[in-house]
Image (cartoon, rainbow, N blue to C red):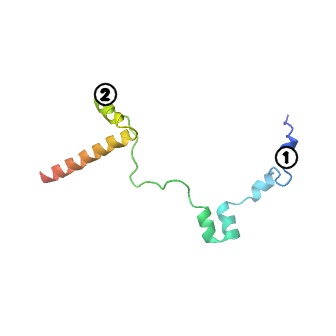
Amino acid sequence: MRKKPNPELIDDENPEWTEEDFKRARPASEVLREQFGDEIANELLKPRGRPPLDNPKERINIRLSHEVVHHFKESGPGWQSRIDSVLVDFVKREIRRQKRQ
């Protein structure tokens, strides 16, 4: 049995969609171009958020000694990024050292 709609929430100017409405619906990319043109449509359809990274960081689990974790955590927020920075520097030095050999 369907629940009766709250009369205060019924919007006569914006009725609930029917199956026919859904069949006639078109993607915003089509409708916006027709209504506003390519330039404005492209701006409205632009993806939100950060762009994807070329080399995203990998999520891993790693066990570190208490002294290492304590040292970096003690320096405040961003401690995991600082550990990453130290490891990146180490890898660069190792690569340079191996090239000299």
Could you say where residue 39 lies in the image, as x and y percent from the top left? 60, 71
Residue 15 place in picture, x, y as percent: 83, 51
- Residue 2 shown left or right of residue 29 in the figure: right
Image height of 31 relative to 80, above or below: below
Q: Name the residue under label 1.
A: 10
User: Picture quarter containing residue 43?
Assistant: bottom right
- Closer to the camera in the image, 29 or 73: 73
Residue identified by numbered label 2 = 66
Q: Nearer the viewer, residue 72 or 92?
A: 72
Q: Please tell me whether residue 46 is drawn above or below residue 89 in the rendered image.
A: below
Secondary structure state at the residue bearing disc 2: helix
Foreground of the two, 87 or 34? 87
83 in relation to 70, above or below = below
Amino acid bearing label 2: His
Image quarter of residue 70: top left
Earlier sequence position, callout 2 versus callout 1: 1
Q: Which residue is drawn at 81% across and 49% down?
A: 16
Q: Which amino acid does label 1 sit on?
A: Ile
At x 71% / y 60%, what residue is drawn? 26
